[in-house]
């Protein structure tokens, strides 16, 4: 019985540890080039990864809200936002035109096979992750107006 408890504890410890790591997953740029999300997110400053989709209204609202203040965020903290679309092969064609139409000044990547989404254990979008030193330090699902202000407070705290 003690062995089972020990194994269970070690398994839970390992799984929670691995959930704090950025997975080593390849995604695509809008131009079709393959990039590794771990390498893209491995920067000296704070990185926000937002999983979103063209069919997800809260996702669009969140990225629009951040877009309005993103230049200020970057100037003050150096934060980088990586918007990773989880649109599948049926809807991925909408991503580029939506991004261009919105004028989002983010690094937009495509997770068409949902490999990153699965590796992160994301059941829904939007999923927003704050990364510092290649570790996930904040994980937030969903969006409600004003959530971007709380996100920015966390970014400022981590950027000091």
Image: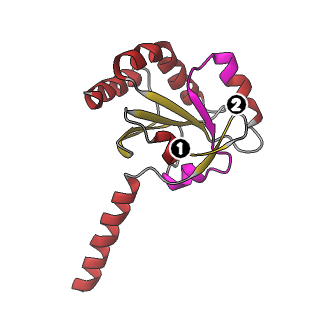
Residue 160 x %, y %: 24, 27
- Comes first in the chain, label 1 or label 2: 2
Residue 77 x %, y %: 35, 22
Q: Which mark is residue 107?
A: none
In the picture, which quadrant includes the N terminus? Answer: bottom left
Instruction: Give the answer, above or below, for where 122 lies relative to 77.
Output: below
Residue 52 x %, y %: 57, 35
**What count of labels does the image hold?**
2
Residue 43 x %, y %: 42, 37
Q: Nearer the viewer, residue 20 or 160?
A: 160
- Residue drawn at x 68%, y 46% as measured from the top left: 112
Q: CA distance from mark 1 to mark 2?
A: 18 Å
Instruction: Give the answer, above or below, for where 145 lies relative to 49.
Output: above
The answer to which image quadrant residue 46 occupies is top left
Count residues near mark 2 (Cα–Cα under 10 Å), then give few for <14, some for 14-19, many for 20+: many
Q: Which residue is mark 2?
A: 95
Count residues near mark 1 (Cα–Cα under 10 Å), then give few for <14, some for 14-19, many for 20+: few
**Is 108 a magenta residue?**
yes
**Is 110 a magenta residue?**
yes
Secondary structure of the residue carrying numbered label 1: loop
As drawn, the residue found furthest toward the front would be 44
Determine whether, in the image, residue 21 is placed left or right of residue 127.
left
- Residue drawn at x 22%, y 84% as measured from the top left: 2
Secondary structure of the residue carrying numbered label 2: helix
The answer to which image quadrant residue 91 occupies is top right
Q: Which mark is residue 124?
A: 1
As drawn, the residue found furthest toward the left would be 2
- Residue drawn at x 77%, y 42% as measured from the top left: 90
Determine whether, in the image, residue 34 is placed left or right of residue 12.
right
From the viewer's perspective, is the residue at label 1 or at label 2 nearer?
2
Question: What range of the chain is rendered magenta?
Answer: 99-121
């Amino acid at each position: 019985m003690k062995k089972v408890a020990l194994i269970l504890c070690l398994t839970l410890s390992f799984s929670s540890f691995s959930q704090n790591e950025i997975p080593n997953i390849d995604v695509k740029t809008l131009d079709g080039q393959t990039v590794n999300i771990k390498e893209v997110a491995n920067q000296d400053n704070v990185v926000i990864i937002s999983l979103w989709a063209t069919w997800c209204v809260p996702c669009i609202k969140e990225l629009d809200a951040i877009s309005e203040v993103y230049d200020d965020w970057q100037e003050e903290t150096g934060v980088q936002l990586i918007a990773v679309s989880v649109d599948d092969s049926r809807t991925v064609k909408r991503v580029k035109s939506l991004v261009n139409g919105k004028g989002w000044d983010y690094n937009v990547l495509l997770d068409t096979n949902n490999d990153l989404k699965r590796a992160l254990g994301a059941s829904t979008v939007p999923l927003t992750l704050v990364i510092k030193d290649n570790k996930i330090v904040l994980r937030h699902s969903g969006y409600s107006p004003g959530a971007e202000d709380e996100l920015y407070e966390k970014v400022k705290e981590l950027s000091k």
